[in-house]
Image (spheres, rainbow, N blue to C red):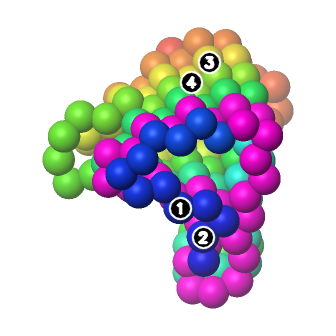
Amino acid sequence: NFGVSNSSSSPTMTNVTASASGGTNSYGVRNSTSSSPTMTNVTATASGGTGSNYGVSNSASSPTIQNSRISASGGTSNYGIYNAAASGSHTVTVNNSQITGSTNTIRNDAEFTTRVGASLLDGGGVIANGGTFTCVGVYAENYAALNATCL
């Protein structure tokens, strides 16, 4: 299930609510094949999938996310933001947002650099998986400040 699916595109998404629920896997927003959307004031939720839920899934894509609420819940695995690619170099930028996922708030593959500023990471920790994190002014659900690598 997909709330919004961007493929080989770079849309401007402003004031969008995208949700997906049920099915095996649910994706609030899925960006694939070199998509680079600008996502502002977006609420992306994925819930109730019997397998995995992804608030935002980036497959070989480089979105800019700002002033947004991204969440995944209710599945076997729940990822706020999930970044995966077989090759290339991709950058995900997140500012002034709330990211929620019980498995991982953000998960990277080695091909990703993720930059997070002034945002809340609520739930499971980040996992670099060979990728890179840079965090400034980022905090956990208990309002504990996270360090420069989001830990």
Q: Which residue is mark 2?
A: 2
Numbered disc 1: secondary structure: strand
Q: Earlier in the sequence, mark 1 or mark 3?
A: 1
Residue in the image at 31% along x and 35% along y = 90
Helix, strand or loop at mark 2: strand
Q: Position of residue 77 (x, y in %)?
A: 57, 69
Q: Compared with residue 59, is residue 39 higher up or lower down, i.e. above or below? A: above
Percent x, y for residue 49? 65, 80
Q: Which residue is mark 1?
A: 5
Tell me how far mark 1 sits from mark 3, CA to CA: 25 Å
Type of amino acid at the residue the image marks with label 3: Gly
Of the numbered discs 4 and 2, the one sitting upstream in the chain is: 2
Work out how far the residue at label 4 is from the one at label 3, CA to CA, in angstroms: 4 Å
Residue that carries the numbered disc 3 in the rendered image: 117
State the residue position of label 4: 116
In this rendering, does residue 132 appear at all? Answer: yes
Are dots 2 and 1 in contact, CB under 8 Å? Answer: yes
Q: Position of residue 67 (x, y in %)?
A: 75, 28
